């Protein structure tokens, strides 16, 4: 190899090999970086999407059980069932409640069972699977539980209890309704999030895998440290509990102290890189052989074209991907080699443009995902508003009124400001409903709501408390001011024409009103107003009665 052709051949072979390795390294690095970028963007989006779905799903479960518990059937029949279990009224109440709960259970497959407790923790009735509850848990459920509980392990299953208090018409808690939610029901919800060939699962605060998108997970544990709340998810690769190398990410789910984890096999995630290595190795081997044979033959006949080619290769190795070598004066073999080299650089340049196009498409996809997240946030706001609004009158509903009352009572106690409660009941509403039909009764409710809305202040809360009952919570208002407002409401309703042609001898819709002021006890405030309303009914209706201070 001491001759010029030998040295040229050796140089060409070395340059070809170096160039091939450089191209391989650049290509593989670009593919690997591209896949890393896609995974880094994909996994956090998957986790946030799954977290939003879970948050919305659990919010819906709490809302629907609250709605179930606030129905008139439970409000009226639960006290009878608890007080008179062996009487005819008690048995009739048992049948009606059992029929109601059976209907709910049949239409709500996510619940394994539903059961009722009285205010002392006795189980009155249940439908669905039998669940054994510890005695201390039963006492807590009967007196305080509301919303969705933490995860419990009962009868060998991970479950959660969705609870809501049952109140009488007077606002007294007479018992509680509980729905047993088996965590395996979340598998279908998690499976709606597309994780490709990976798995999405929920980890409890102690590291137990509660449920996964792949089905049952009882007995599995997550061996890595759980992320702190408020920390944005990052993508890392590690060995899971089975010793398999995976790519994964995790994010905290604050509602229950859970962690959402997504994992995908490392080999599957980076399969394109492995395929690229195999293809590139074959291409490199072919290029080296081709260039080696050509170099030996070319070096024996002419050195200058080889030198030109070597210079072109060197330029390419230095980063000039658009190198074009002219081979007009070369032999046919060298011209073929030059054309091959030029075609290779052109393909590399094309691949570079395709990678750039892919990067832009990923950016556009991220923009679309951001837009979808914004739409989901807007839908969540609409759902939240619907959950606190009465669909018929468009006033706030019983649930919102109770929450607002608790805040106002605390504020009144803290600032020592007066607070008044006005309870309003439509006189003879059942008779109107029977005469006009449900559509006519609904129209009366809507019109009375519209009439009273014109008289209350913006700082007052007018709500439909239930059925034909309305309630006004007036802050910074003493008994005299509350009575004056109640009298305005009564007079405005009495003077409003509800019908073009009266359906009976009674030509006007009227209301009876009870008024009370806060005296340091929220329960007493309701009882005072309710007794005043009862006295207004007894006094002949269409009047306002204020609670006595001695009551």
Image: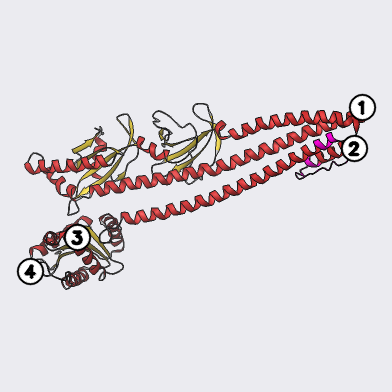
Between disc 4 and disc 2, the foreground one is 2
Point out residue 432 in the picture as x, y percentages from the top left corner: 13, 62
For label 4, the residue is 505
CA gap, disc 1 and disc 2? 17 Å
Q: Position of residue 103 (x, y in %)?
A: 22, 42
Q: Secondary structure at mark 4?
A: loop
> Mostly what secondary structure, the magenta segment?
loop
Whether the residues at callouts 3 and 2 have beta carbons within 8 Å, the answer is: no
Q: Quadrant of residue 330?
A: top right
Is 89 part of what is drawn in magenta?
no
Residue 2: numbered disc: 1
**Mark seen at residue 428:** none
Tell me whether the residue at label 3 lies in contact with that at label 4, contact meaning CB atoms closer than 8 angstroms: no
Q: Is residue 327 magenta?
A: yes
Q: What residue appears at the point 36 percent right and 35 percent down from the top-left corner?
A: 184
Q: Is residue 374 left or right of residue 409?
A: right
Residue at position x 60%, y 49% in the image: 360
Q: Quick one: 320 or 212, which is closer to the camera? A: 320
- SS state under label 2: helix
Which mark is nearer the camera, 1 or 2?
2
Q: Which residues are magenta?
A: 315-336
C-alpha distance separating marks 4 and 2: 119 Å
Which residue is nearer to you in this view: 1 or 201?
A: 1
Residue designated by label 2: 304
Which residue in the structure is indicated by mark 3? 439
Q: Alpha-carbon distance for marks 3 and 1?
A: 107 Å
């Amino acid at each position: 190899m001491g001759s010029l052709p030998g040295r040229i051949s050796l140089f060409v072979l070395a340059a070809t090999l170096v160039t091939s390795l450089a191209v391989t390294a650049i290509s593989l690095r670009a593919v690997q970086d591209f896949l890393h970028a896609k995974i880094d963007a994909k996994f956090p989006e998957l986790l946030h999407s799954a977290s939003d779905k879970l948050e919305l799903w659990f919010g819906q479960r709490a809302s629907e059980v609250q709605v179930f518990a606030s129905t008139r059937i439970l409000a009226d029949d639960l006290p009878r069932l608890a007080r008179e279990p062996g009487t005819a009224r008690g048995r009739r109440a048992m049948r009606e409640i059992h029929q109601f709960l059976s209907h709910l259970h049949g239409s709500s497959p996510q619940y394994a069972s539903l059961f009722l407790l009285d205010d002392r923790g006795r189980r009155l009735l249940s439908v669905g699977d039998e669940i054994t509850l510890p005695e201390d848990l039963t006492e807590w459920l009967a007196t305080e539980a509301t919303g969705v509980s933490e995860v419990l392990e009962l009868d060998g299953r991970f479950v959660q209890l969705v609870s809501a208090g049952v109140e009488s018409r007077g606002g007294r808690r007479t018992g509680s309704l509980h729905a047993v939610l088996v965590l395996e029901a979340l598998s279908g919800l998690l499976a709606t999030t597309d994780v490709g060939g990976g798995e999405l699962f929920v980890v409890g605060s102690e590291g137990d895998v509660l449920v996964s998108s792949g089905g049952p997970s009882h007995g599995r544990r997550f061996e890595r440290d759980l992320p702190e709340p408020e920390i944005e998810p990052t993508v890392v690769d590690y060995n899971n509990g089975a010793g398999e190398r995976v790519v994964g990410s995790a994010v905290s789910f604050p509602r229950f102290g859970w962690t959402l984890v997504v994992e995908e096999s490392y080999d599957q995630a980076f399969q394109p890189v492995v395929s690229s290595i195999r293809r590139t190795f074959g291409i490199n081997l072919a290029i080296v052989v081709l260039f080696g044979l050509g170099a030996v033959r070319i070096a024996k006949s002419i050195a200058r074209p080889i030198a030109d080619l070597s210079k072109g290769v060197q330029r390419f190795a230095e980063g000039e991907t658009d190198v074009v070598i002219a081979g007009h004066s070369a032999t046919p073999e060298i011209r073929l080699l030059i054309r091959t080299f030029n075609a290779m650089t052109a393909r590399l340049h094309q691949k570079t443009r395709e990678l750039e196009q892919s990067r832009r498409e990923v950016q556009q996809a991220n923009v679309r995902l951001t837009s979808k997240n914004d739409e989901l946030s807007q839908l969540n706001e609409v759902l939240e508003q619907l959950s606190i609004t009465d669909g018929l009158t468009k006033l706030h509903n019983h649930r919102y009124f109770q929450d607002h009352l608790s805040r106002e009572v605390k504020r009144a106690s803290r600032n020592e400001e007066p607070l008044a409660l006005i309870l309003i009941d439509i006189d003879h509403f059942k008779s109107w409903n029977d005469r006009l039909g449900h559509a006519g009764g609904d129209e009366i409710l809507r019109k009375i709501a519209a009439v009273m809305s014109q008289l209350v202040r913006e700082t007052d809360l007018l709500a439909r408390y239930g059925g034909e009952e309305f309630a006004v919570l007036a802050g910074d208002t003493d008994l005299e001011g509350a009575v004056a407002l109640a009298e305005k409401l009564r007079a405005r309703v009495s003077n409003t024409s509800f019908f073009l042609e009266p359906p009976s001898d009674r030509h006007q819709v009227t209301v009876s009103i009870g008024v009370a002021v806060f005296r340091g006890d929220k329960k007493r405030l309701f009882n005072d107003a309710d007794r005043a309303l009862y006295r207004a009914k007894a006094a002949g209706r269409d009047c306002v009665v204020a609670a006595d201070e001695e009551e």
